[in-house]
Image (cartoon, coloured by chain):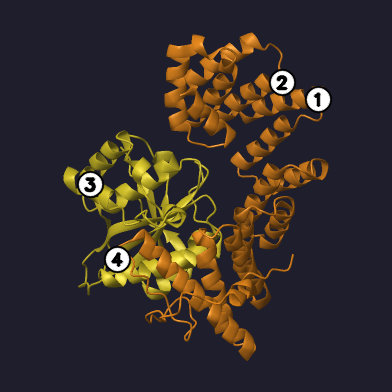
Amino acid sequence: MTVIKLSTQAYCKMLLHAAKYPHCAVNGLLVAEKLKRKEGQPLIFVDCIPLFHGSLALAPMLEVALSLIDTWCKENKYVIAGYYQANERVKEHRPNQVAERVAARIAENFSEAALIMMDNSKFSMDCLEPAVIIFEHHDNKWKCRDTNIDCYEDWSEAQKITAVLLEGKSYENLIDFDNHLDDLRNDWTNPEINKAVLHLC
Amino acid sequence: MRDKLRKWREENYRNSEQIVDVGEELINEHASKLGDDIWIVYEQVMIAALDCSRDDLALTCLQELRRQFQGSHRVKRLTGMRLEALERYDDAFKIYDAILQDDATNTAARKRKIAILKAQGKSTEAIRELNEYLEQFVGDQEAWHELAELYINEHDYAKAAFCLEELMMTNPHNHLFCEQYAEVKYTQGGTENLELSRKYFAQALKLNNRNMRALFGLYMAASHISASPKVSAKVKKDNMKYAAWAANQINRAYQVASNPITQCRLPSGSDGTASGGWHSAHVVRSDWPRPLLEELFQCYF
């Protein structure tokens, strides 16, 4: 079983994306470094790219996003390795058809792809509890991982930095792919937020 | 400040955090200067406060409104909304039913009942109720759009398309409905739907030539059609032309935005595939002749 680790930057941006659009479903991609991993070496999701908010079930823009982000990944020696989604309703954290389909598509290119669902009920300003549930692909089904396994590169760092950024309303400056389509100057790699995370590390 | 609130109110923005910040200050510090506007501000701030879990602020606003407009249905609806925010859905239902008994044409109360069903995850019931509502109130655009979204979430694209068709008929100049309709058709798939999708993306672009989704959509649809083995050689050639044109426009748009991330290497028309296979884009002339543009934008309305 692959050991999965979420970097602080990836976790932060996922939560900021959900915080920016509390009344919508949001989704995005997770990227890992493209390198040959040795036996037992963990798969680290180094960054996340927020995609859409609101209507997630339409194909064309998703395909555009996957294409453009795939090119960007190739240029930066990354690979699309996962998908995250936060549902619209607070109590609903099961992956729906969209989540399963996109994650399956990613798994075609990257066999150890993970599907991450946000547990909205655990999402708070002080981030005391980890708010994600990781699913893995087994026999064409997505099975939930044991939530007791630590899946963070550094949980206390992730928790502290996310709480600081939420408090400071950094989510107002988070750019997702939808924002990019509204105005091409909006940068979905979010360099400013990445800098802020690094600065707080 | 009141101008900001008015703008947000008129354009139906859901920027609740900002509304609470601005509105709370306005109410606490400048209430006397608002005159009769204060009541509409109370209503707007109350709804935003519910969105931000600020029950304290919501209750304050509600109480002021109750005191001023006793027995009003509009205020009763706000009371119901507060109960919804507290997840006391049964109590909220009772309030809305009471309003409807008094006034069967009260659309706000009916819509709130549908919203409760949506919040409870009862999509099928919500869709059924919304359909019944629309049989009576055929002109309610907001409701048609809500129904389209519900159908999209349930992956019932054919019915979503129907709702968007209603919206396009009554709003022929709205590029967003055109573009969303094109997205639904694209998602449905199949050559016929892809062709329709391309036409509606083109129409959206005609209505607003800065709609990037429409431009990308046009590119994707044309690329997929030209790559399909089922189309004639002429259709293939035409769509490759459209895709190349769109790719060029997209590249130009990125250059204008001088976005450093993407040098925009979209697949060329010759390969046609819109997903795998990367070649650098054809260098195409940017001054396409007028007749081609008209051809691109032909739609069957």
Q: CA distance from mark 3 to mark 1?
A: 55 Å
Residue flagged by tag 4: what amino acid is it? Thr
Kindly state the secondary structure of the residue where label 1 is placed: loop
Q: Along the polypeptide, which appears first: circle 3 or circle 4?
A: 4
Query: What letter labels the chain drawn in orange?
Result: B
Q: CA distance from mark 2 to mark 4?
A: 58 Å
Circle 3 Cα neighbour tier, 10 Å, few/some/many (<14 / 14–19 / ≥20):
many
The answer to whether the residue labelled 2 contacts the one labelled 1, judged by CB atoms less than 8 Å apart, is yes
Out of A45 and A72, give the one closest to the viewer: A72
Q: Chain of mark 1?
A: B
Label ID, residue A197: 3
- State the image coordinates of residue B133 (x, y, percent, origin top left): 77, 41
Label ID, residue B73: 2
- Residue B86 placement: quadrant: top right
Residue flagged by tag 3: what amino acid is it? Val
Residue at image position (33%, 70%) is: B263
Out of B208 and B285, give the one closest to the viewer: B285
- State the image coordinates of residue B220 (x, y, percent, origin top left): 52, 72
Residue tagged 1: B103
Residue flagged by tag 1: what amino acid is it? Asp
Out of B263 and B21, give the one closest to the viewer: B263
- Figure disc tally: 4
Residue flagged by tag 2: what amino acid is it? His
